[in-house]
Image (tube, rainbow, N blue to C red):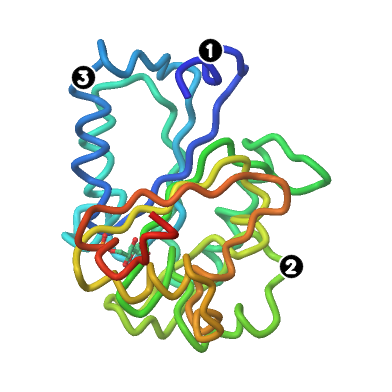
Amino acid sequence: MCADIAATKIFSIALAGGTTPMNAYKQLIDNPARYPIEWSRVQLLLSDERLVPANHPDSNQGQIQPIFSHTDAQCIWPDVSFAMPALTAQAYEQVIFERVPSVNKIPQLDILLLGIGPDGHTASIFPDSQELISPSERLVMPVTNAPKPPPNRISFTLRLINASKHILVLATGEQKAPVVKAVLTQEKSALAYPIAHVKPDQGSVLWIVDESAASQLPQSVL
Ligand code: 6PG
């Protein structure tokens, strides 16, 4: 990644929210000798955000901003001051179009980090959402009924997700083991899980799981 960043004019990384990746973000920042990243060439985005003030404990930006504030990475966070999820989504989509270089008319993220929930959601795409039945043409979508509180969010759509160059899926803990197994062994039931719909057009997907999350995987997959 470090070499890719050095070779790229601006490197777009979209970060996952939730709790799983926070320590990994801190590791990246606290070990510059091990991870010599030219942060001035990096712009950071969020793959989803909860529509709460940035100083609210549920805010992804609120958790992530302090970690990266010691770098000179450019932070491109959603403007959560809009009351309506639809307006917030539309505004963020416009910013992404302006700031992230497109390939085949879709902004292409260099790296996208995604977490997964025990129900197989990723970003803020939840099971039974319309996005799984007829994926949106948009890049960012409003979410008003998230089963994982808070209910009002915005989320990258599958269209933007699957246009990424490199996707890293992070999963830790026993709770995630059934989803990890179903998706990585391509069980038919896996399509109920939004994370199973993450199939980049040209890019790569790398799953980074701990022993607990991998505990149900057969040897053939390990
Ligand atoms: C969010 C996240 C969400 C998260 C998963 C896993 O804003 O809720 O983006 O998709 O990655 O729910 O959350 P944990 O890492 O806390 O288990």
Labelled disc at residue 6: 1
The residue that appears at 22% across and 73% down in the rendered structure is 175
- Ligand 1 located in image quadrant: bottom left
- Amino acid type, callout 1: Ala
Instruction: Please identify, in this view, whether the residue under mark 2 or under mark 1 is nearer the observer.
Output: 1
Neighbours of disc 2 within 10 Å: few (<14), some (14-19), many (20+): few
Residue 56: % across, % down: 19, 60
Under circle 3, the secondary element is: loop
* Inter-mark Cα distance, 1 to 3: 18 Å
Would you say 1 lies left or right of 52 here? right
Task: Determine the residue located farthest toward the front in the rendered image.
Answer: 219
Sequence-earlier tag: 3 or 2: 3
- Amino acid type, callout 3: Asn
Residue 68: % across, % down: 28, 31
Would you say 72 lies left or right of 101 here? left
Residue 75: % across, % down: 42, 35
Q: Quadrant of residue 11?
A: top right
Sequence-earlier tag: 2 or 1: 1
Labelled disc at residue 31: 3
* Inter-mark Cα distance, 3 to 2: 39 Å
Neighbours of disc 3 within 10 Å: few (<14), some (14-19), many (20+): few
Q: Quadrant of residue 122?
A: bottom left
Q: Quadrant of the C terminus?
A: bottom left
- Amino acid type, callout 2: Glu
Q: Which residue is mark 2?
A: 137
The residue that appears at 36% across and 60% down in the rendered structure is 219
Considering only vertical position in the picture, is 28 above or below 202? above
Q: Nearer the viewer, residue 175 or 158?
A: 175
Residue 40: % across, % down: 44, 16
Q: Nearer the viewer, residue 136 or 121?
A: 121
Would you say 150 lies left or right of 81 here? left
Neighbours of disc 1 within 10 Å: few (<14), some (14-19), many (20+): some
